[in-house]
Image: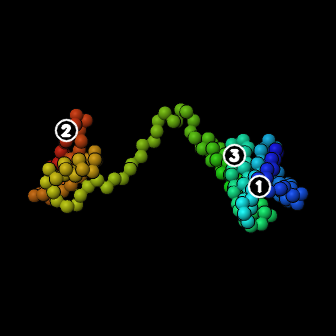
Amino acid sequence: MNVRLTARRMTLSPEVKRHCDKRLRGLERSLEAGAELDILLSREKHRHDVEIRAVSRGLNIVVQEENADVFIALNQAFDSLEKKLKKEKQKLLERRRRGGRERAVAPPAEEAAEPAKRVIPAQEFSLKPMSVEEAILNLDIKKREVFMFRRLKSEKWAVVYRRRDGHTGLVEPE
């Protein structure tokens, strides 16, 4: 793990270096050997700002904390980094697990040629009696392919549908 410790507008004391080394030892388990870690400490008036950037294979995390005390800011930043690392590792494990399950469940290529047919229920009907013209308007307004309705005078069911030639078809049971 490559670590760069930078201080801006402040001097880097040995206590701060020791504290960072101590906290980094705990992070070595979470980060890969080739990971790069940039720790930037800066001070403005009475505030200490800590920014940590962790870059590794497929991982780019930036954490920023500020506090009046540099050690508190460092602890908060390292805690946030640990949480984000744990979350990213969990996401990676979930992706790997899901990928394995999907491959195991997938049917062989021979069975994939014939997809199973299924029935999908649709609410494309109206209980209110209406004329054929109103049903065609409903078909156009709601951009449906098929619309079932009750005829205005006879109260019998009828269906209007969009034909492939662009016209509208009407089906009435006998």
Query: What is the x, y in percent for residue 7?
Result: 79, 53
Instruction: List the residue tagged with mark 3.
Output: 59
In this rendering, does residue 31 appear at all? no
Instruction: List the residue tagged with mark 1.
Output: 9
Q: Earlier in the sequence, mark 3 or mark 1?
A: 1
Q: Residue at x 80, y 47 (%)?
A: 4
Query: What is the x, y in percent for residue 77?
Result: 74, 59
Q: Amino acid type of disc 1?
A: Arg
* Quadrant occupied by the N terminus: top right
The quadrant holding residue 78 is bottom right
Q: Secondary structure at mark 3?
A: strand
Q: Is residue 133 left or right of residue 162?
A: left
Q: CA distance from mark 2 to mark 3?
A: 56 Å
Q: Secondary structure at mark 1?
A: loop
Q: According to the image, what is the colour scheme of the structure?
A: rainbow
Q: Are marks 2 and 3 in contact (CB under 8 Å)?
A: no
Q: Nearer the viewer, residue 67 or 123?
A: 67
Q: From the image, state whether disc 1 or disc 2 is nearer to you.
A: 1
Q: CA distance from mark 1 to mark 2?
A: 77 Å
Instruction: List the residue tagged with mark 2.
Output: 167
Q: Residue at x 31, y 55 (%)?
A: 123
Q: Amino acid type of disc 3?
A: Leu
